[in-house]
Amino acid sequence: MRLLVQIFHYFYAYLHLIPPEEGGREGGREGGRKVGSVPASPLPLLSFVVPTGAAGHITAGLLAAMMGLPVHRLLMATNRNGVVLSRVVREGVWGKEGGREGGRVIQTNSPAMDIQSAYNVERILSLMAREGGREGGGGNVPLTGREIGKSMERFYAGGSTALPPSLLRHLIGWGMECALPVREEEVEATIQAVYEGGNKGGKEDGRYLLDPHTAVGVTVAAGKRREGGREGWREGERVVCMGCAHPAKFAQTVQKALHLKSEDEAVEVMKREGGREGGGGPLFLGVGEEVARAKKRRREEGGGKEGIGCPVYGAGERERWRKRLEEEVAWLEEEGGED
């Protein structure tokens, strides 16, 4: 269900940002291609920056592209735990070995991305093996479902798999890329810059508070942390950064990023100025309740980490992942019953 909702978000972004006269939907044009004797104008370049941990949201983007959405680029934005995903698209290797942090999972201020067990990679590999490249599909990628399953088992056991070159070419052909990892201090700087710069460009009182996960993506979308140090985007390229979470779950990070005196002051800032249209908008209704919920979870888990993020487990701890998932489902069901 989550993937279906996320696919919708990609199409919504396209329909919201690309006018009909640019998208090739009028005048006898289909998808920017020439139909009959009517010349077609090229589609605008529309790219997505997707904060990525378990790779579910980026999988939805890939599915949207396969459904016909004219996506130029699907750029994964990761924190310092993103080495595993980076190796998939840069080296064609599915495994955690050789990471810059020695294979360790690092606790960061974007906890839901503190993950190396990106289990949705199995979906991505299956899609590539079945559908092939962007031009017509049917790429005859030499990787069966059974082989993909074995690759996942090797990954969970700490091993790695070299992907077939044709599969990697197809993956890149669909626009899949991975930016350089974003560090915690960059996340805080982006939260501060977006908040303090929100009233510029004709937007009065338009200050906006990012959660740290979305801030990872915005850092990349702003042209930083691109592979090879390149900044900026191609002329005419329109970039959408996918949002992720409610900043009220991360009041400590907001406090630090905005140089506030206390977590309570961060909560007041969110209540006063966090809204979508000039403060107090629907995105931030119930801030106090959300902060209290996050604090309760931190106390119950016996630690100080913010949010209700993914557990900080490595690739070889599959059973602990399954147990934690069952606990989260039970907790969500209990919360739903209370409502």
Image (cartoon, grey):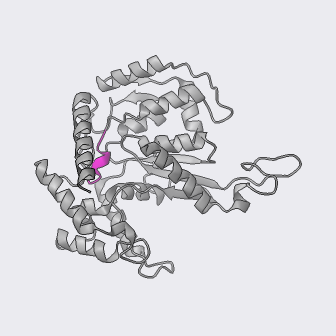
**In the image: residue 27, left or right of residue 273:** right
Q: Nearer the viewer, residue 135 or 95?
A: 135
Residue 91 visible? The answer is: no
**In the image: residue 41, left or right of residue 217:** right
Whether the magenta-drawn stretch holds residue 53 is answered as: no
Identity of the residue drawn at 17% across and 52% down: 297
Q: Which quadrant of the figure has residue 269?
A: bottom left
Image quadrant where one finds the C terminus: bottom left
Identity of the residue drawn at 50% across and 78% down: 201
**In the image: residue 58, left or right of residue 154:** right
Residue 12 visible? The answer is: yes
- Residue range of the region highlighted in magenta in the rendering: 109-115
Image quadrant where one finds the N terminus: top left
Residue 94 x/y as whole percent: 41, 28
Identity of the residue drawn at 60% across and 48% down: 72
Residue 302 x/y as whole percent: 10, 48
